[in-house]
């Protein structure tokens, strides 16, 4: 492991210290690592699923799908994706 320094609001740290033993963690730092790991894995899965999109679009282009149809479909998909993230509470990034 690597040592890092992290600034966070005092109330968040106090909440981590309070919640950690209730969730079976030996302290707030292991709980923070778990939270970061879970969030990172979730984002990586979501981003990995997006990596196939460019290949799919190129395939559709080769099959003759018009550019305006592709752009419209992508705009619609992005709107749905952003809305679902907002509903899940994952749109806030700092």
Image: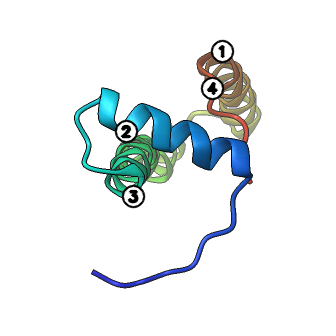
Query: Can residue 57 be seen by looking at this rendering?
Result: yes
Q: Secondary structure at mark 3?
A: helix
Q: Which numbered mark, 1 or 2, is in the foreground of this view?
A: 2
Q: Which numbered mark, 3 or 4, is in the foreground of this view?
A: 3
Pick whichever of labels 1 and 3 is earlier in the sequence: 3
Q: Which residue is mark 2?
A: 20
* 1 and 4 marks in contact (CB < 8 Å): yes
Q: Which residue is mark 4?
A: 85
The quadrant of the rendering that contains the C terminus is: bottom right
Residue 24 image-quadrant placement: top left
- Residue at screen point 54% across, 44% down: 61
Question: In whole angstroms, how far apart are the C-alphas of marks 1 and 4?
Answer: 5 Å
Q: Which residue is mark 1?
A: 87
Question: In whole angstroms, how far apart are the C-alphas of marks 3 and 4?
Answer: 27 Å
Residue 28: x, y in percent? 41, 50
Pick whichever of labels 3 and 2 is earlier in the sequence: 2
Would you place residue 37 above or below residue 70 in this image? Answer: below
* 2 and 4 marks in contact (CB < 8 Å): no
Asked whether, in this view, residue 91 is left or right of residue 18, the answer is right
């Amino acid at each position: 492991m690597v040592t890092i320094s992290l600034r966070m609001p005092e109330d968040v740290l106090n909440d981590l210290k309070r919640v950690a033993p209730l969730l079976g963690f030996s302290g707030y730092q292991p709980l923070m690592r778990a939270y970061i790991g879970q969030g990172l894995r979730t984002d990586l899965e979501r981003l990995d699923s997006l990596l196939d999109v460019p290949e799919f679009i190129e395939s559709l282009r080769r099959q003759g799908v018009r550019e305006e149809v592709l752009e419209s479909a992508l705009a619609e998909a992005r709107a749905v994706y952003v809305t679902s993230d907002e509903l899940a509470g994952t749109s806030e990034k700092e």
